[in-house]
Image (cartoon, helix red, strand yellow):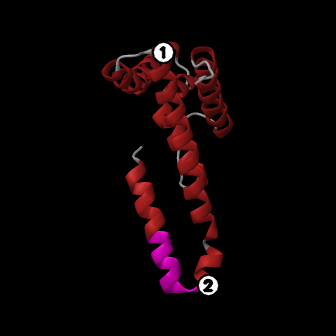
Amino acid sequence: MNIDPAIHRFVLFVIQASLAGWEWTKANYWIAGSLLLGLMVWILMLSLLALALSAWIKWKIAAGGLVLGVFFAGAGFGTALNNVMRIKYGSLLNLTEVMFKIWAKLFRWPEDTGISLEASWVTVGLVCAICLWLLLRRVRAFEVVK
């Protein structure tokens, strides 16, 4: 899921609201809320993931590759788990699919990803909590005395 289309949708919402008037804006206010909430969750998860991995891996290129690897390996391993075990909850390892489920519910899109909305929110919460735990274990505050 790319953030750029979400920003374009927000700009389009603002333009449509300014051109259509107050009645259209009142009838469709949920679109702006969905955009803001979806973007905040996506940015929070990506930022925490990148910070946590960068704190543990000192080499910048390797840390960036590991962030990319989390998405590719998670998607691949989740799909393999679904096929071998004949379950649908292996898709929770695919963070892109988890975020798509959340975005689909926010925007009232018809979707059938096989995972529940509650499981998607729990997965995002767990990823953020694990990343925060990793950051707290690795990053230490210290005082600089002059």
Provide the secondary structure element on which disc 1 rests.
Answer: helix
Say few, some or many: other residues with alpha carbon within 10 Å of mark 1 (under 14 / 14 to 19 / 20 or more).
some
Say few, some or many: other residues with alpha carbon within 10 Å of mark 2 (under 14 / 14 to 19 / 20 or more).
few
In the image, the segment drawn in magenta is 12-22
Q: Is residue 63 above or below residue 124?
A: above
Image position, residue 130 (x, y; %): 62, 21
Residue designated by label 2: 22
Q: Residue at x 61, y 35 (%)?
A: 120
Side (left or right) of 83 relative to 139: left
Image position, residue 12 (x, y; %): 44, 70
Magenta-span inclusion, residue 99 = no
Residue designated by label 1: 56
Q: Residue at x 62, y 15 (%)?
A: 137
Q: Amino acid at mark 1?
A: Trp
Residue 124 visible in the displayed image: yes
Q: Quadrant of the N terminus?
A: top left
Which numbered disc, 2 or 1, marks the residue closer to the eye? 1
